[in-house]
Image: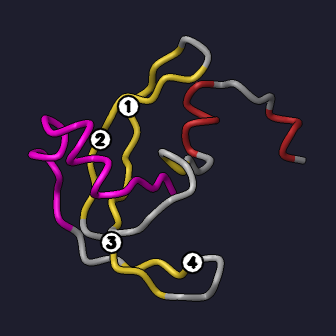
């Protein structure tokens, strides 16, 4: 799951923010707390000079990073070989 803060989305990507789709999912965090997702957007992610559109879930949280990327982008960009996961 890719995670992004609503505050950063509104500040740095207002044109993407206006296209946010609402959702009712909740996620349990590493600290075992339940968080409600505000919505999700599709945004381009650049890694190593390659771009891929990714679904990013938006939360009202303070992240220690600009964005938290889950595994889906790894497979779309083919940046890690298949044998790495085994």
Q: Is residue 31 left or right of residue 80?
A: left
Mark in the foreground, 2 or 4:
4
Check whether the beta carbons of the residues at disc 4 and disc 3 lie within 8 A of each other.
no
Picture quadrant where residue 77 is located: top right
The earlier-in-sequence mark between 2 and 4 is 4
Any mark on residue 29, and which? Answer: 4
Mark in the foreground, 1 or 3:
3
The earlier-in-sequence mark between 4 and 1 is 4
Any mark on residue 61, and which? Answer: none
Q: Is residue 22 above or below residue 16?
A: below
The earlier-in-sequence mark between 4 and 3 is 4
Check whether the beta carbons of the residues at disc 2 and disc 4 lie within 8 A of each other.
no
Check whether the beta carbons of the residues at disc 4 and disc 1 lie within 8 A of each other.
no
Q: Secondary structure at mark 4?
A: loop
- In 3D space, how far apart are the residues under numbered discs 4 and 1 (Cα atoms)? 24 Å
Q: Which residue is mark 3?
A: 37
Q: Is residue 48 above or below residue 17?
A: above
Q: Is residue 32 left or right of residue 44?
A: right
Q: Which residue is mark 1?
A: 53
- In 3D space, how far apart are the residues under numbered discs 1 and 3 (Cα atoms)? 20 Å
Q: Which residue is mark 2?
A: 42
Residue 49 x/y as whole percent: 55, 11
Check whether the beta carbons of the residues at disc 2 and disc 3 lie within 8 A of each other.
no
The earlier-in-sequence mark between 2 and 3 is 3
Residue 25 x/y as whole percent: 33, 76
Q: Secondary structure at mark 3?
A: loop
Check the image and tell me how it is coloured.
secondary structure
Q: Nearer the viewer, residue 58 or 5?
A: 5
The earlier-in-sequence mark between 2 and 1 is 2
- In 3D space, how far apart are the residues under numbered discs 2 and 3 (Cα atoms)? 15 Å
Magenta range is 1-22
Tell me what residue is drawn at x 40 percent, y 68 percent.
61
């Amino acid at each position: 799951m890719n995670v992004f803060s609503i505050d950063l989305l509104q500040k740095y990507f207002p044109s993407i923010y206006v296209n946010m789709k609402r959702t009712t999912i909740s996620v349990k965090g590493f600290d075992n707390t339940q968080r409600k997702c505000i919505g999700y957007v599709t945004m381009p992610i650049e890694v190593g000079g390659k771009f891929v559109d990714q679904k990013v879930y938006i939360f009202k949280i303070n992240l220690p990073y600009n964005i938290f990327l889950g595994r889906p982008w790894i497979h779309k960009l083919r940046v890690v070989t298949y044998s790495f996961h085994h």
